[in-house]
Amino acid sequence: MDLKILALLQADATMPIAEIGKAVGLSTTPCWRRIQKLDEAGVIRARVAILDPAKVNVGVTVFVSIKTDQHSVEWLERFHGAVADLPEIAEFYRMSGEIDYLMRVVVPDIAAYDAFYKKLISRIDVSKISSAFAMEQIKYTTALPLSFALAGKERGRG
């Protein structure tokens, strides 16, 4: 039941609770209680509006790979602090493998990316930065696959 509710909320978080309840076979109050429990448990982290990047002038996506020779906790904290207030960074990951960090950066154009790049390298020393400009977005979703949540519950992990 919760997974059905979550699937509906992932598709449209503005859907009225009565409509969600009807879709999953619950009346409004029990449906609202289930959503509240999912909120309280941290399963639902936020309810947001997803914007069209081109319409807010950030239609260029750049994947930035960063390699560093620094692997101390102090450097890691400095790096996190250096990039925390850069709004162009939409996603930021510490990676395993050949690269240490991967960022998804959104900007209006190459000139704006160049300004971002200069700002980034002025804040922190890195060994190597590689930028790859997305040519076409083939798939984009914020919806998480929920079949794994069910599998985790069946194995006693959920």
Image (cartoon, rainbow, N blue to C red):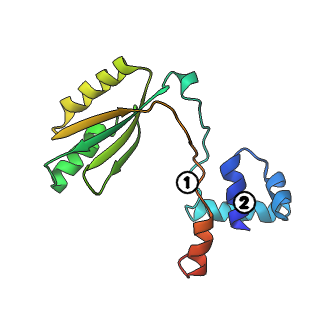
> Considering depth in this image, is 87 or 133 the residue closer to the camera?
133
In the image, taking residue 100 as reference, residue 35 lies left or right, namely right
Disc 2 marks a residue whose amino acid type is: Ile
Is residue 86 something one can see in this rendering? Answer: no
In this rendering, is residue 1 above or below 109? below
Report the mark closest to the observer, 2 or 1: 2
Based on the displayed image, in which of its 4 quarters is residue 134 positioned?
top left
Residue at (65, 65) in percent of width and height: 37
Mark 1, Cα crowd under 10 Å, few <14 / some 14-19 / many 20+, is few
Disc nearer the start of the sequence (2/1): 2
**Residue 16 image position (x, y, % from top left):** 79, 48
Looking at the image, residue 28 lies above or below residue 121: below
Residue 24 appears in the figure: yes
Which residue lies at the image location 72% right of the left edge and 54% below the top edge?
A: 8
Could you tell me which quadrant the N terminus lies in?
Answer: bottom right
The residue indicated by pointer 1 is: 45
Cβ–Cβ below 8 Å for labels 2 and 1? Answer: no
Q: Position of residue 28 (x, y in %)?
A: 83, 59
Give me the disc on residue 5.
Answer: 2
The x and y percentages for residue 34 are 71, 65
The residue that appears at 57% across and 47% down in the rendered structure is: 142
Quarter of the image with the C terminus in it: bottom right
